[in-house]
Image (tube, grey):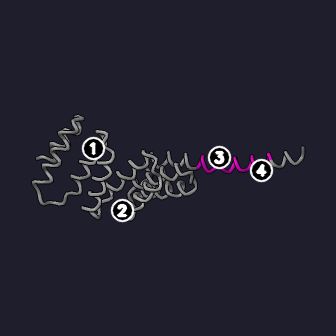
């Protein structure tokens, strides 16, 4: 009951009450706490408690070693914070658990794009599209990655042309 009520409070943006209900649920049950810890992490993130959210996502990842959702949530939050190396690490851990999870593949592509690695991001989006050819986000990321990889090539060619022109002047 506490967990469902916590979700309802979170939906209503009543984060303190949601967190309190998640805590009550954790104290009242012996079932695996991974999903509840993840939900509590989401509530903490939404309330602005970033440090608490990151900690809960790690606890959730440790409690449920097969599900990748808490690691993906943590990686997404780290991406938003600009902590790209950590985000990529957690995203790779999520993909080790569930290699065909398109949401994790898309997140990895986003992280790689932020790291200016468009070629690798394009490769990851191609994997995602093979798994789910109707995934709109994968196509958007693929287009962006392709543009950025082409843009890099054009930029390099332009710099080379400028050097040649300087030599002719």
Dot 1: element:
helix
- Residue drawn 27% across and 44% down? 44
Rate crowding at label 3 as few (under 14), some (14 to 19) or many (20 or more) other CA atoms within 10 Å: few
* Residue furthest to the front: 51
Task: Give coordinates of residue 53: x percent, y percent.
Answer: 30, 48
Mark 3 and mark 1: Cα distance apart in space: 39 Å
In magenta, the rendered stretch is: 146-162
* Labels 4 and 3: the sequence-earlier one: 3
In reply to whether residue 156 is colored magenta, the answer given is yes
Please tell me the numbered disc located at residue 14. none
Task: Give coordinates of residue 36: x percent, y percent.
Answer: 21, 52
Of circles 2 and 1, which is in front? 1
Mark 2 and mark 3: Cα distance apart in space: 32 Å
Residue that numbered label 2 is attached to: 98
Q: Are marks 3 and 1 in contact (CB under 8 Å)?
A: no
Mark 4 and mark 1: Cα distance apart in space: 50 Å
Residue that numbered label 4 is attached to: 160
The quarter of the displayed image where residue 81 is located: top left
* Labels 4 and 1: the sequence-earlier one: 1
In reply to whether residue 50 is colored magenta, the answer given is no
Mark 2 and mark 1: Cα distance apart in space: 25 Å
Report the number of discs.
4
User: Is 139 in front, or is 4?
Assistant: 4
Dot 3: element:
helix
Q: Is residue 107 left or right of residue 149?
A: left
């Amino acid at each position: 009951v506490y967990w469902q009520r916590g979700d309802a409070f979170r939906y209503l943006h009543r984060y303190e009450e949601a967190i309190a209900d998640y805590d009550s649920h954790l104290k009242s049950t012996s079932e695996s706490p991974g999903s509840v810890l993840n939900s509590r992490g989401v509530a903490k993130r939404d309330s602005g408690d970033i440090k608490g959210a990151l900690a809960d996502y790690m606890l959730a990842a440790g409690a449920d070693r097969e599900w990748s959702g808490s690691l993906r949530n943590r990686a997404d939050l780290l991406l938003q914070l600009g902590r790209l190396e950590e985000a990529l690490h957690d995203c790779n851990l999520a993909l080790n658990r569930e290699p065909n999870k398109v949401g994790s593949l898309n997140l990895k592509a986003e992280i790689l794009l932020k790291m200016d690695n468009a070629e690798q991001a394009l490769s990851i989006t191609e994997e995602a599209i093979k798994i789910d050819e109707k995934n709109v986000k994968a196509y958007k990321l693929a287009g962006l990655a392709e543009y950025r990889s082409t843009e890099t090539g054009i930029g390099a060619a332009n710099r080379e042309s400028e050097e040649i022109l300087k030599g002719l002047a």
